[in-house]
Amino acid sequence: MPQHAPTRRICRDCDGFATVAITTGTRQTDGSRVTVHVTCPTCKGTGHALPAALVRAGR
């Protein structure tokens, strides 16, 4: 069966993984890992690229 292409363009910087959780390597008192959530600054967490007409440029 043929694969369907996504209708919206995927962000080229994050490849669609707009928000990630990164472990810091330390543990909390209950033993769970301390994580930092990071959002892609290019697509603002949507995972999709914005059309060039909608991107604000300049001042």
Image (cartoon, grey):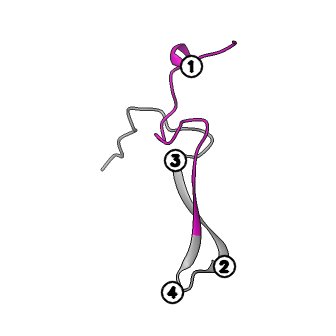
Mark closer to the chain start, 1 or 4: 4
Against 31, residue 1 (above or below) is above
Name the front one of labels 4 and 2.
4
- Residue 2 drawn in magenta: no
* Label 2, label 1: how far apart the Cα atoms are: 39 Å
Tag 2: residue type?
Answer: Thr
Tag 4: residue type?
Answer: Asp
The image shows residue 46 at horizontal and vertical percentages of 46, 40
Mark closer to the chain start, 3 or 1: 3
* Label 3, label 1: how far apart the Cα atoms are: 18 Å
User: Dot 2, how many residues are within 10 Å of its Cα: few (below 14), some (14-19), or many (20+)?
Assistant: few
* Label 2, label 3: how far apart the Cα atoms are: 24 Å
The answer to whether the residue labelled 3 contacts the one labelled 1, judged by CB atoms less than 8 Å apart, is no
**Which residue is nearer to you in this view: 1 or 48?**
48
Mark closer to the chain start, 2 or 3: 3
Q: Any mark on residue 26, and which?
A: 2
Look at mark 3 in the image and give the residue it sits on.
18
* Residue at figure coordinates x 53%, y 13% from the top left: 53
